[in-house]
Image (cartoon, grey):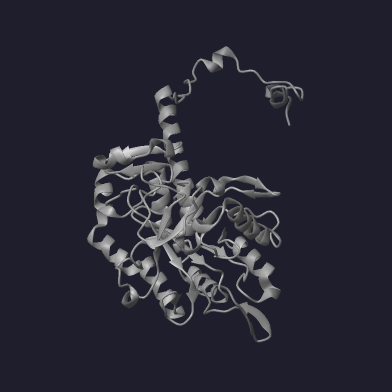
């Protein structure tokens, strides 16, 4: 390599030093174009992101309930349009059926055949009824999808036909033809029915003494409630205050022998006989037993007012007897009332799908007990 070439090479900059571009070389460069975003752009972007997030959350919440679950979640988020309220005949001051069952055995005046009991559940499901607990009805904590009607199911007397265990292939299982067996199977097939019921117990406690604790625990763990039906099934209208307190506390103690922490929330009056002093149902401590009921139930014969209706009295809740239509000579049974609501849909409780709102037709506004609204919003259309 010649000396002339060596001299033409520029000297290398030492390592670690920063090369500088001379002003002369930079003069010819064009400045780079930088995008500038306005404040309005960022606000718009934020709204879009929020909308996407809401859609994702709603879809996630409803994923387990399919299309109906999605619709229910969306309804709770934004509410129904007024046209939908009219179409569905939403009326959360309408009447609610509290059904009264006794034995699940051969058909009779106080008994419902297993297949007929199953048919009752199918009928109610197909006609837009969904279960709620008695406690949720009384506290106005009703949550059923828009367009559907709450329903309460009760059983009196703790008859063995209501809950029975049998052996099958050497294993203890619930008899599929007892009330609990039928309800549990129906719940598996129709999970959106929200199957639940309250059992008003007597000392027989469903029979099978060796399984009493197992049965009571099963009921509570699977969303059923246990209520008071006294110890001796005495008419409370003929009993002294002391006798009434002994009957109530005796039933509570009987259940707590197996479920020490369980508190009964309601009582079904034996024979529908009302005490002269209803304050006994909220007596408080009686010989170490807490007596404090939210509700008491009568025997028959009509639906209950809605919990925000001025006529609603949780201590005198009427029930409808679930009997075969051929035995319903007084037109006061399940199917007679179901037919009545089909012919008079404006009298039936129909949910708006939002448990935080009580929606009613405007002409019924004077019937609302505002004290029972609590934190719920009243909507009239």
* Nearer to the camera, 283 or 371: 283
For the N terminus, give its image quadrant: top right
Q: Does the rendering let one see residue 267?
A: yes
123 shown above or below 242: below
Residue 369 as seen in the image, left or right of residue 221: left
181 shown above or below 283: below
Q: Position of residue 327 (x, y in %)?
A: 34, 76
Question: What residue lies at 41% left-to-right and 45% top-to-bottom?
Answer: 76
Residue 200 as seen in the image, left or right of residue 151: right
Q: Does the rendering let one see residue 268?
A: no
For the C terminus, give its image quadrant: top left
* Nearer to the camera, 360 or 110: 110
Q: Position of residue 44 (x, y in %)?
A: 40, 31
Question: What residue lies at 35% left-to-right and 59% top-to-bottom?
Answer: 302
* Nearer to the camera, 86 or 97: 97
322 shown above or below 14: below
334 shown above or below 43: below
Residue 14 as seen in the image, left or right of residue 336: right
Residue farthest along the right direction in this orientation? 15
Q: How many marks?
A: 0
Question: What residue lies at 34% left-to-right and 40% top-to-bottom?
Answer: 368
Q: Position of residue 223 (x, y in %)?
A: 56, 60
Which quadrant would residue 298 be assigned to in this image?
Answer: bottom left
Residue farthest along the bottom direction in this orientation? 169
* Nearer to the camera, 167 or 58: 167
């Amino acid at each position: 390599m010649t000396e002339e070439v060596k001299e033409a090479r520029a000297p290398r900059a030492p390592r670690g030093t920063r090369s500088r571009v001379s002003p002369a070389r930079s003069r010819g460069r064009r400045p780079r174009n930088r995008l500038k975003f306005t404040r309005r752009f960022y606000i718009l972007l934020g709204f879009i992101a929020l909308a996407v997030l809401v859609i994702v959350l709603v879809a996630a919440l409803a994923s387990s309930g399919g299309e109906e679950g999605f619709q229910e979640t969306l309804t709770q988020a934004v509410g129904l349009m007024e046209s939908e309220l009219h179409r569905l005949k939403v009326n959360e001051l309408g009447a609610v059926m509290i059904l009264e069952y006794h034995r699940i055995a051969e058909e009779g005046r106080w008994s419902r055949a297993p297949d007929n009991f199953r048919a009752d559940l199918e009928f109610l499901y197909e006609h837009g009824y969904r279960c709620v607990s008695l406690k949720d009805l009384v506290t106005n904590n009703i949550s059923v999808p828009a367009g559907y009607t709450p329903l309460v199911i009760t059983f009196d007397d703790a008859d063995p036909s209501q809950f029975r265990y049998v052996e099958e292939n050497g294993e203890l299982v619930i008899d599929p033809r007892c009330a609990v067996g039928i309800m549990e199977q129906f719940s598996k097939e129709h999970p959106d029915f929200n199957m639940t019921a309250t059992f008003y117990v007597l000392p027989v406690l469903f029979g099978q003494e060796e399984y009493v604790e197992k049965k009571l625990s099963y009921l509570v763990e699977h969303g059923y409630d246990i209520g008071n039906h006294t110890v001796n099934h005495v008419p409370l209208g003929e009993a002294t205050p002391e006798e009434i307190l002994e009957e109530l506390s005796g039933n509570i103690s009987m259940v707590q022998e197996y479920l020490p922490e369980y508190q009964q929330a309601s009582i079904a009056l034996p024979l529908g006989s009302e005490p002269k002093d209803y304050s006994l149902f909220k007596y408080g401590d009686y010989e170490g037993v807490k007596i404090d009921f939210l509700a008491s139930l009568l025997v028959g014969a009509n639906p209950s007012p809605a919990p925000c209706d001025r006529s609603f009295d949780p201590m005198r809740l009427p029930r409808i007897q679930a009997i075969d239509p051929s035995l319903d000579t007084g037109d006061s049974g399940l199917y007679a009332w179901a037919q009545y609501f089909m012919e008079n849909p404006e009298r039936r409780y129909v949910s708006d799908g939002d448990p935080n709102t009580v929606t009613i037709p405007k002409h019924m506004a004077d019937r609302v007990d505002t004290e029972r609204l609590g934190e719920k919003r009243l909507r009239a259309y």
